[in-house]
Amino acid sequence: MFFAHPILRHFAIIVMALALFMAIGGPLALLQGVAWVGMVHDFSKTGTLSEAVAKTFDGHHLCPLCQKLVKARAAEEKTPVTMKVDKKAEVFIAGSSASVPVPGSRRFTYGPVPFVLMPERFIAPPVPVPISSGLLS
């Protein structure tokens, strides 16, 4: 195992979870949740809780944080996921004059398989089968 020490293993798991959280847009989702809670809190001061929830999720009453999140998501969608490469593929492909050595090969054989008769493969259960005395009564 690469990380033999338990602390290193836990640290690696935490770092990987944090990287995954960042990669899937976790910070924006977390801020969106904070914005929704704040909106429900603010709208519930002037009306009922059901009206506050309806105003929060109808899309017409955006708070300043929600407006910034919409702009951030739009900017995130505009940036390409992959980098654009200006180089031509022909630069990286070797020409036909270049000789690439063929990897060596050798014959591979599996070891002998022992022949075992079918009755020897299975072990019979103990006779008599042990039964707990509490199950019979």
Image: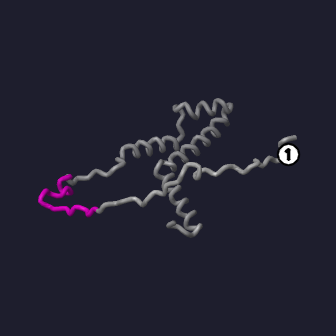
Q: Total of numbered circles in the picture? A: 1
Query: Is residue 104 inside the magenta stretch?
Result: yes
Query: Is residue 3 inside the magenta stretch?
Result: no
Dot 1 amino acid type? Gly
Q: Quadrant of residue 111?
A: bottom left
Q: 25 or 37: which is nearer to us?
A: 25
Q: Is 42 left, or right, of 97 in this rendering? A: right
Tag 1: Cα neighbours inside 10 Å, few (<14), some, or many (≥20)? few
On screen, 116 above or below 41? below
Q: 14 or 103: which is nearer to us?
A: 103
Q: Where is residue 67 in the image (x, y as percent from the top left)?
A: 48, 41
Q: Position of residue 93 (x, y in %)?
A: 19, 56
Name the residue: 55% across, 49% down. Answer: 118
Magenta range is 89-105
Name the residue: 28% across, 62% down. Answer: 105
Q: Where is residue 48 in the image (x, y as percent from the top left)?
A: 68, 31
Q: 119 or 77: which is nearer to us?
A: 119
Q: Is 89 left, or right, of 30 in this rendering? A: left
Name the residue: 20% across, 52% down. Answer: 89
Q: Main secondary structure of the magenta part?
A: loop
Give the colour scheme shown. Answer: one colour
Q: 18 or 99: which is nearer to us?
A: 99
Q: Where is residue 69 in the image (x, y as percent from the top left)?
A: 48, 44
On screen, 78 above or below 96? above
Q: Look at the image and tell me in which quarter the C terminus lies.
A: top right
Name the element at disc 1.
Answer: helix
Name the residue: 51% across, 66% down. Answer: 1
Q: Is 33 left, or right, of 73 in this rendering? A: right
Identify the residue position indicated by label 1 in the image. 134
